[in-house]
């Protein structure tokens, strides 16, 4: 019994590179780290609880999509971008907060958001460390 011959694809010209559509799109994201002298449960609550969040991130509507107590929060930001915040305990009295936000369409938009988060993470630190 004869097998049908497989059709082969024509070879790409010499020196041609295969480029996917995904590779052509630049992705701009922001990731920061802030260590705060406060237990992880208080830092997590300052993000999760609306009344506490208003004290350091006022008038900022957002949707909490998923929250894993004392570990992470996944948020849908007002512009439709994703904000993921991880919490890493550093002993019993310190916590490292690591927000990752994006994607943004331009490097300028990402730079503005990085500046925004630097200011807000400092406001969070001041809010939590004053108690």
Image: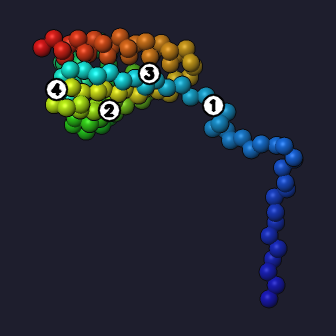
| Residues under numbered marks 3 and 2 in contact, where contact means CB atoms less than 8 Å apart | no
The residue beneath circle 2 is 86
Query: In the image, 112: left or right of 36?
Result: right
Question: Please, what secondary structure does the residue beneath circle 4 have?
Answer: loop
Mark 3 crowdedness (10 Å alpha carbons): few <14, some 14-19, many ≥20 = few
The residue beneath circle 3 is 79
Q: Earlier in the sequence, mark 2 or mark 4?
A: 2
Q: State the quadrant of the C terminus.
A: top left
The residue beneath circle 1 is 25
Which is in the foreground here, disc 3 or disc 1?
1
Disc 2 from disc 1: Cα separation? 27 Å
From this view, report whether residue 121 is shown above or below residue 81.
Answer: above
Name the residue at the bottom extreme: 1
Q: Position of residue 11 (x, y in %)?
A: 84, 54
Question: Please, what secondary structure does the residue beneath circle 2 have?
Answer: strand
Question: Please, what secondary structure does the residue beneath circle 1 have?
Answer: loop
| Residues under numbered marks 4 and 3 in contact, where contact means CB atoms less than 8 Å apart | no
At 40% from the left edge and 23% from the top edge, which residue is drawn? 32
| Residues under numbered marks 1 and 4 in contact, where contact means CB atoms less than 8 Å apart | no
Disc 3 from disc 1: Cα separation? 19 Å
Q: Earlier in the sequence, mark 3 or mark 1?
A: 1
At 23% from the left edge and 11% from the top edge, which residue is drawn? 126
Q: Position of residue 120 (x, y in %)?
A: 33, 13
Which is in the foreground here, disc 1 or disc 4?
4
Name the image quarter holding residue 125: top left
Q: In this view of the protein, which residue sits in the foreground, 104 or 85?
A: 85
């Amino acid at each position: 019994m004869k097998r049908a011959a497989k059709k082969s694809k024509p070879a790409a010209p010499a020196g041609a590179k295969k480029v996917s559509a995904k590779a052509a799109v630049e992705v701009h994201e922001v990731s920061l780290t802030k260590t705060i002298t406060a237990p992880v449960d208080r830092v997590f609550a300052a993000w999760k609880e609306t009344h506490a969040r208003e004290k350091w991130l006022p008038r900022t509507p957002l949707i909490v999509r998923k929250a894993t107590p004392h570990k992470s929060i996944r948020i849908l930001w007002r512009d439709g971008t994703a904000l993921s915040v991880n919490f890493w305990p550093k002993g019993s009295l310190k916590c490292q907060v690591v927000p990752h936000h994006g994607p943004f369409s331009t490097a300028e938009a990402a730079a503005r958001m990085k500046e925004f988060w630097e200011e807000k993470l400092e406001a969070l630190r001041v809010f939590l460390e004053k108690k």
